[in-house]
Image (cartoon, rainbow, N blue to C red):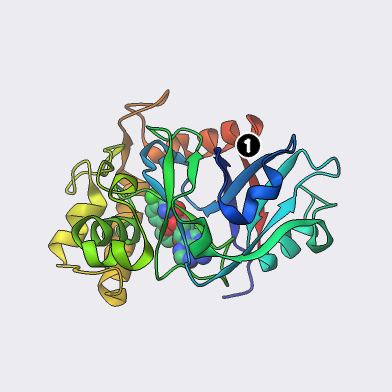
Amino acid sequence: EGVAPQEYVLIKMEVLRPYPEPLRALEQQACRVYLAAATLRPETMYGQTNCWVQPDGEYGAYALSADGAEVLVMTARAARNLAYQDVAPEFGREHRLAGPFLGRELLGTALRSPRAPRTPIYVLPMLTVSTGKGTGVVTSVPSDAPDDYRALQDLREKAALRDKYGVRDEWVLPFEPVPIIEVPGYGCLPAMAACEQLKVRSQNDRELLARAKDEVYLRGFYDGRLLVGAYAGQRVQEVKQRIRQEMLEAGEALLYSE
Ligand code: A2H
């Protein structure tokens, strides 16, 4: 318990021009800049509607390869861990190209994320994102993740919350959960079904969200069937590893453990 490392898939969400202020210096360079989102569910990337950061968290932009052709935005802690991993042995703190800056400075950044149903998607605030886990960047799949569903609904329903973080209507209002997996007993939007059943009202209802997450996660994995993509009709359990492998081989993702 607590000893086994957690392995995440990092999804490379490409930053589109114009770059946000803290990344501006990289805009004239030949490199590609990505936000690196840590996920355990790469097979859900067909349902991405946005990206989450911790508005008060600290991030930087780090060179992924010695030639500096690819740059990843994440926490310093994640960059340091990645520096010791085989995927990017030369990656590290000394290769920071921009930052530190706050998550709130990235809000509204437009991204192109692999397998997302639309482009661009936008960087938005989620108050419960931890900078002590993964990369501090999370991809949002509100169809299947209760945390994502509730945080997106909070922004969609609460104009005062949007105002507080300077979130524009057009970053949020056009984006609804996209059905990607059918789970018997929950339907095609399992996170929404679980949140409604348990009456989760806010992203800060931590206990209720943890319960919703446990239920949806197990059911989605064991009984879920994909509705979209090349493996539509197949069970999540049977194709999860293949989708993960395809994303890694296509350069859309990389592995990270901590
Ligand atoms: B998962 P574990 Cl569709 N702070 O990805 C808060 N949450 C974080 C995070 C951080 N710093 N880093 C990663 N996460 C989220 C997809 C997903 C996820 C779906 C369904 C369930 C699910 C889309 N969001 O996770 O504590 C990421 O959300 C349910 C556990 O390391 C990541 O996978 O076990 C998951 O939490 C990792 O959580």
Total numbered labels: 1
| Residue at position x 41%, y 70% in the image | 128
Q: Position of residue 39 (x, y in %)?
A: 51, 52
Q: Quadrant of residue 245?
A: top right
Q: Is residue 162 left or right of residue 236?
A: left
Q: Position of residue 52 (x, y in %)?
A: 44, 57
Mark 1 Cα-neighbour bin, 10 Å: few <14, some 14–19, many ≥20: some
View quadrant of ligand 1: bottom left
Q: Residue 187 versus residue 202: which sits nearer the camera?
A: 202
In this picture, is 101 found above or below 7? below
Q: Secondary structure at mark 1?
A: helix
Amino acid marked by disc 1: Leu
In this picture, is 196 found above or below 27? below
| Residue at position x 20%, y 58% in the image | 194
Q: Is residue 236 left or right of residue 74?
A: left
In this picture, is 250 found above or below 26? above
Q: Position of residue 79 (x, y in %)?
A: 71, 60
| Residue at position x 24%, y 67% in the image | 160
Residue beneath label 1, please?
248
Q: Is residue 151 left or right of residue 32?
A: left
| Residue at position x 52%, y 56% in the image | 106
Q: Position of residue 153 (x, y in %)?
A: 24, 57
Q: Quadrant of residue 159?
A: bottom left
Q: Quadrant of residue 189?
A: top left
Image quadrant where one finds the C terminus: bottom right
Q: Is mark 1 within 8 Å of ligand 1?
A: no
